[in-house]
Image: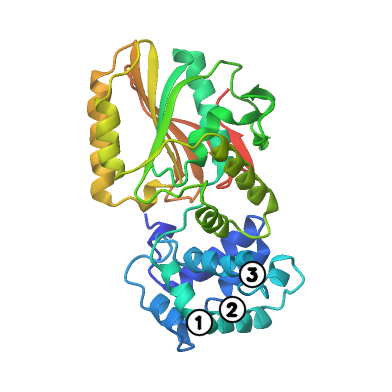
Amino acid sequence: MASIMDIASVEQAIAWQADHATKNGAPATGRVVRAQLPLLTDGSAVGARMAAWPGKPLEDALPLRLTGGLHNLVLTGADTRLAAVYRGEETDQDAIDALVGDLARRFETRLLPWLDGPPQTNEAGRSASIMAGLLWLSARVGPRFVLHELGASAGVNTMMDRFAFDLGGTRTGPADSPLRLAPEWRGAGRPPEAAVDVLAISGCDRAPIDLTDPDQALRLKSYVWAEVTERLARLDAAIALARVQRPDVVAMDAADYVDQVLAAPQPEDSTRVIYHSIVWQYLPPATQERIAAAIAAAGARATPSRRLAWLALETNRASFRHELALRLWPDQGAPVCLAAAHAHGAWVEWLQP
C-alpha cells in the first residue's frame, strides 16, 4: 500500500502539509505553507531549489523547513509582516502568497540554509504518551528504568522525569514543575497508578541543539507552529528547566548510540528503555535496520531482572496516525499498541483497558 509519505510531487507535498496544519489547529501556518506553491514557478532561488527537490518532499518535511525559516524572521524581528498572518488578522491567501514571495526573494541568502536539514520540533507534549507507556510498563515489570532517547534534538523529552503529568486523571511527576502536561484524554481507560523511578536518562542526536544557547533555542522555537501558543509556552518552560540542569544529549548517530548503550552495564531489577517520538521516518533505512537488529539481539539476552523495552511514538505510514507501540523482552510477544496520539501531544487516545 502506498504511503502518504511517498508523495513525490513537491506541489502535492505542500498542499498536503498545508491541509494537515489547518486540520491540526494551525490554519495560519497552513496558509503560510500553502503560499509556498507559487514559489515553485516564480524564478526565485528558494523556489527553484524546492521545485527540484531530489528526495521525497513530504518525508523530508520540505514545506516545514521553509516554514521554520519564515517564522524565524518574525521571532528575530528581521521582518515581522507575517505576524499579522499568525495572529489571524490577515487571511487572504493571495495577499499571503505575495508576502511570502517577497520574503523569499528579499531574504534569499538567509532562508536557503533552512532547506538544508529537517525541522527539529522537539515537542514536550509527546512525553505524555511516553510517560503513559512507562506507567503501563511499571505496573507489569516494576518501576526502575534506564531511559535512552533516539533523535533527542535539544533533549526536551530527556527531561520528562522533571515534568508534571495528568494523564486522564493519573498524576505523576513533581507537582511544582514549571512544565505541566495534561493532554485531552480519550478512550475508556487510562494508565495505571504506578511509580516511575528514573535511574538515568539520556539521548542522542546527530546535531543536538543546546537549549541554554539563546540563538539555538530560538531556532528550535522557529519550527513551532506560530499560532499554537501553548507549544511555545511549553518550550519556554523546557528552556528554563535546561538552564537549571542541562539535558544529557550526545552528538552521535542513532545506531552507534544504541550499540553503545546496549553494551553498557544495566542495574539489577531494571528495565532499559530505548524510546523515540516522530523520528523514525528521518532515519536512513540502513540505520533503522541496524537499530532493530541490535535491539532484537539485546532482547534475546534480556533477563527477568534486566529487562529491555522499545517504546516508540511514530507515524503509521498507511494511516498517518501516530501510534505508541511497545516491545518488551524477555517474554516478548507481538508488539502492543498502547495509544494513538496527536503529533504535538494535544490529545492521547488510550487503547488499553
Tell me residue 156's x, y (percent): 52, 41
Q: Where 260 sits versus 100, above or below?
A: above
170 vs 329, left or right, is: right
| Mark 3 surroundings: few (<14), some (14-19) or many (≥20) residues within 10 A | few
Q: Do the residues labelled 2 and 1 touch (CB within 8 Å)?
A: yes
Residue carrying label 1: 39
- Locate the C terminus by quadrant: top right
Disc 3 marks which amino acid? Gly
Residue carrying label 2: 100
Can residue 217 be seen at all in this image of the molecule? yes
The answer for how far apart the CA atoms under marks 3 and 2 are is: 16 Å
Can residue 149 be seen at all in this image of the molecule? no
Dot 3 or dot 2: first in sequence order is 3
**Looking at the image, which is closer to me, 19 or 302?**
302
Q: Where 341 sits versus 75, above or below?
A: above
Q: Is mark 3 on a helix, strand or loop?
A: loop
Q: Which colour scheme is used?
A: rainbow
Specify the label residue 77 is tagged with. 3
Closer to the observer: label 2 or label 1?
Answer: 2
Q: Is mark 1 on a helix, strand or loop?
A: helix
**Looking at the image, which is closer to me, 180 or 239?**
239
| Quarter of the image where one finds residue 193 | top right
Dot 3 or dot 1: first in sequence order is 1
The answer for how far apart the CA atoms under marks 3 and 1 are is: 23 Å
110 vs 204, left or right, is: right
Disc 1 marks which amino acid? Leu
Specify the label residue 48 is tagged with. none
Tell me residue 169's x, y (percent): 69, 25
Q: Where 323 sits versus 331, above or below?
A: below
| Mark 1 surroundings: few (<14), some (14-19) or many (≥20) residues within 10 A | many
